[in-house]
Image (cartoon, rainbow, N blue to C red):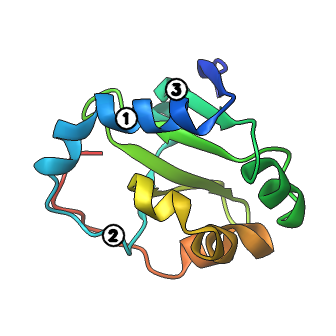
Amino acid sequence: MSKSPQLIILSNSAQLEKLFEENKSAYQSFKGSYTASVYGNLRLLDEMPCYQLAFSPYRELAAECEMEHFSLRQSLATGRIYLWNLNYGGHAPRLELRPVKLTHLQDLSLMKRYHENWGYELSLKIDKNPRYEI
């Protein structure tokens, strides 16, 4: 990776809600699946701002899932927010991105399922030919 992405630390749920509110139009027009991940490339990862959720319950969730912190990535092209995982499992690194709504993030059991075991759940259902721009 050539450079570090812009890191934005969100310190409370109001800031997280504002992030989604500011990007509402990206979700109104979205025709893809929220239950499938897509592959991205490392150049894309370099470009995507990173939002670190530095407040409860996401700090605790990160610790439970053995993550340094819980973070999201945002597409500069569409404004959509993504869960992400960099999969190193016996092959070249693969960026796995899953579009996410605020309601998904508020479902802590879903977030735990997606992120435990090094993001295994995010790699189970990959749409290799998405019909939407990341």
Residue bearing mark 3: 49
What number is the disc on residue 30?
none
Q: Amino acid at mark 3?
A: Pro
Compared to residue 125, the image places residue 16 above or below, namely above
Q: Quadrant of residue 24?
A: top left
- The residue drawn where x is 54% and y is 60% is 106
User: Marks 2 and 3, how far apart in space?
Assistant: 23 Å
Under mark 2, the amino acid is: Lys
Between circles 1 and 2, the one closer to the viewer is 1
Q: Is residue 101 left or right of residue 114?
A: left
* Label 2 vs 3, first from the N-terminus: 3
Tell me the distance, in whole angstroms, between the alpha carbons under discs 1 and 2.
Answer: 18 Å
- Residue 11 location in percent, x, y? 69, 29
Residue at the limit of the structure toward the bottom, as seen here:
124
- Is 49 placed above or below 67 here? above
* Disc on res. 75: 1
Element assignment for label 2: loop
Looking at the image, residue 126 sits to the left or right of residue 32; the answer is right
Of label 1 and label 3, which has the lower sequence position? 3
Circle 3 — which element? loop
Can residue 33 be seen here? The reply is yes
Q: Which of disc 2 and disc 1 is earlier in sequence?
A: 1
Figure quadrant of the C terminus: top left
Residue at image position (45%, 49%) is 82
Residue 62 vs 16, above or below: the answer is below
- Circle nearer the viewer, 2 or 3: 3
Q: Position of residue 13 (x, y in %)?
A: 58, 39
Give the quadrant of the N terminus.
top right
Q: Quadrant of residue 60?
A: bottom right
Residue identifier under label 2: 128
Q: CA distance from mark 1 to mark 3?
A: 8 Å
